[in-house]
Image: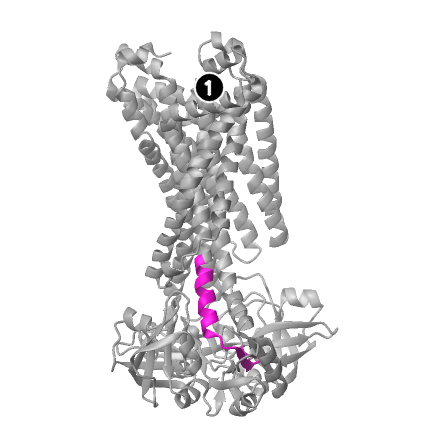
Amino acid sequence: MSANTVMKTSLRNFFAHKGRMALSAVAVLLSVAFVCGTLVFTDTMDTTFDKLFAATSSDVTVSPKAAKSEGSDTGRPESLPASALTQVERADGVKSAEGAVSSMNVTVVNADNKNMGSENGAPTIAGNWTRNDLRSMDITSGHAPRGPTEVMVDSDTAKKHHLKMGDELRTIAATGDFRAKIVGIASFKVTNPGAAVVYFDTATAQRELIGRSGRFTQINVAAATGVSDSVLKKNVAASLDGPYKFQTQKEAADANRKDVGEFMDVIKYAMLGFAGIAFLVGIFLIINTFSMLVAQRTREIGLMRAIGSSRKQVNRSVLVEALLLGVFGSVIGVGAGVGLAVGLMKMMSAAGMDLSTDDLTVRWTTPVVGLLLGIVVTVFAAYVPARRAGKVSPMAALRDAGTPADVKAGLVRALIGLVLTGGGGFALYTATQAAEASEGSLWLGVGIVATLIGFVVVGPLLAGGVVRVISAVLLRMFGSVGRMAERNALRNPRRTGATGAALMIGLALVACLSVVGSSMVASATSELDKSVGADFIIEGQNGLKPQAAEALKKAPYVSHVTEVKFVKTKLTTPDGTKEDESLVAATPTYAQDLRRETTAGELSAAYGKNAMSVGSEFAEKNHLKVGDTMNVAFERGRTADLKIAAITSDDTTFDKGAMYINLTTAERYLPADRLPLNGMMFAKADAGKADQAYKALKSSVASDPTVHVKDQTDYKQTLKDQIGQLLNMIYGLLALAIIVAVLGVVNTLALSVVERTREIGLMRAIGLSRRQLRRMIRLESVVIALFGALLGLGLGMGWGATAQKLLALEGLDVLEIPWPTIIGVFIGSAFVGLFAALIPAFRAGRMNVLNAIATE
């Protein structure tokens, strides 16, 4: 048989079974679409930020060396003197230079005390209006601010919060609150991803944001004609002496892009990981499809072999069909991926992160990656069925359709599956015995992969026993129809095992993450009850500004308020080892608010003069004991010799590894303007006055909507909500894999109905009603779905329990199985089975009895 004939045969078979191929094509389409959509979405985000950073960066930027992209922990941005601007202006190659003021440690609220900033993590930026801002923005209404009572706002924020000219805004900074009326609205020339931006005149910005006149946070330098950025940078650097940082436009844009890039990479690789899971599930669907098609065409393939087709030609014929399927699904998938990316952009915009379709970026690599992945995965999945087709002998033409089971191959498969499952189980057990989480994580990963592959391989062997158990519980009440559904599910264990495995993968991950999430919440809640003695925990969006801290300390019905600051230092141990550490500088009442067990010394002593505590792991690593002295160099402050007065146990969840000093110690060695803002605060109510204290504390900081006062019940709910939101997002991504698995069940049933056409006709002829036939197929589908769910949930709970053992090494020592979720998923799987059977059952019920009986 020539290559041309092989191609014609493949095309004929492909289009003859186009309906049966459609669901497999959908699996390929969805997986490719998810990959391409992720790439287009993240590339568009890259383009958006690239344009923004390129537009906002001057030819050369001069800033303090200590300035950080995330802002200052003191609440006041690092600054440089106005004298530096005068020196820069005199440098060779400078066309113009201007001082700029910018701060992200602000909150802007409207007349209703509503935060004008984004809730998705995008910053609120306040600064002075400069010529450099004209590169990225145009004033579309009013004018730039000219005095202390005037402010200009970006048009996106104005539109989102219905702001108009004359409206009053209040800006809350570390230096205090101040009010100004909107006199101008400026629009971005490029896409603003979601930041809220407000502008003041230079004097106001210096006074209210930096707290001092005559200082700037950076100098924007424009190059004279013919002077390159690199030459200008060199000239400007030569004109200035001091701790300054010099960046060209490209260097400044690259630095900003790097900060955002880490966040975008997390999104990108997480989504690609879920796309990989969908591809894995799709492989089972494709294997099942081609295995059943090969089995149904056994007689046809035998005839082809009898008239001269070689094994290679038959093998090639099936692979060509897979290639056509891969190309068809992948091409549509690439297009769908672009649509998915646009949908994700719309969702992000609704959530507050604005992305414009004008920046939609489809790199040439995206469709290439999508097509290659889709085609390679499809052909790979079809390879085993193709080999099986090649082994069909010419004698098969004389037999009924269908191939006899290969008993030897089944035994080898079962043996391999049992070995893998056993090895994976041993790896999971080893993970639970690990002394360190890092060591256990490696064993956990090995155990998850090995048990997953083992269950997939041993699935046909498990199908017999598990399906019988499920059937005994659920199907016997349906009489003969239930027994026929059970036997149909058991007829081909390999097919049932592969179909169930596709569903098993997604549900195993759901169960594992549910166990881990519930255990984290339960552990944190338990630790909160055990360790936190304070009645109230107060947190702010970017730390607690001084005015909020002072208001909290004056609240009535409160016995004490604890301030907690995180101070950066460089420690030198007695043996000369140097380490960068952040110390917890707090008022002594922190020892009551957060109970910490000590392995040596008394924690109260650590709050004494020139004293401190260290964590047990740090002490063990550096051979420290109570009474030793550590040299502590405070960042931007003086150096002190502090005596270790206590060693705290690191067998905890909260403040693990924390080192404590008295707040007065930090104040002694740090200038007042270098003291960080309070990272959080704690409060204890007067005896019997908890409700009054709660209301009083909330009322005292009501003017700042970013400050949140929580009692222990509130805090527990916040922990639960945060983990719940993360899990819901992950479940949403896993839904893709589960959808593909459902398509697999639909495809299996549809092909099974075609395979049993004659049998169905005979059953109808001897009295089986259409209703009973449809019920039989639905019950078969339910059994297969529950089989996959049972394996997946059992496997996932095992993974989750093992992962919790590793979390216990980090202090999260409570194992909690979320039974409502597990039971809900199991019951939901039954409905998935019913849904998957709708179309196959309907088609079976519509069969003409005589035509079905006459089918060969």
Looking at the figure, which quarter contains the C terminus?
top left
**Is 796 drawn above or below residue 468 in the view shown?**
below
Residue 292 x/y as whole percent: 44, 23
In the displayed structure, 457 sits above or below 227; it is above
Residue 401: x %, y % from top left:
44, 13
Color encoding of the figure: one colour
Closest to the observer: 338 or 245?
A: 338
Residue at which label 1 appears:
295
Q: Residue at x 37, y 36 (%)?
A: 829
- Residue at image location 27% in from the left, 21% down from the top: 845
Q: Name the spot of residue 466 as percent of width and height, x first.
A: 45, 27
The span shown in magenta is: 44-67
Query: Which of 98/569 is in front?
Result: 98
Helix, strand or loop at mark 1: helix
User: What number of labels is visible?
Assistant: 1
User: Quarter of the image holding residue 309?
Assistant: top right
Is 566 situated left or right of 600 in this image? left
Number of residues whose C-alpha sits closer than 10 Å to that of mark 1, classed few (under 14), some (14–19) or many (20 or more) = many
Inspect this view and state whether residue 212 appears: yes
- Point out residue 266 in the picture as x, y percentages from the top left corner: 50, 57
Q: Residue furthest top?
A: 398
Who is closer to the viewer here, 724 or 13? 13
Q: Is residue 183 magenta?
A: no
Classify residue 47 by image quadrant: bottom left
Residue type pointed to by label 1: Ala
Q: Quadrant of residue 162?
A: bottom left
x 48%, y 53%: residue: 363
Q: Residue furthest front?
A: 226
Left or right for 213, reference 630:
left
Vertical relation: 568 (above or below) 211:
above
Q: Is residue 464 visible?
A: no
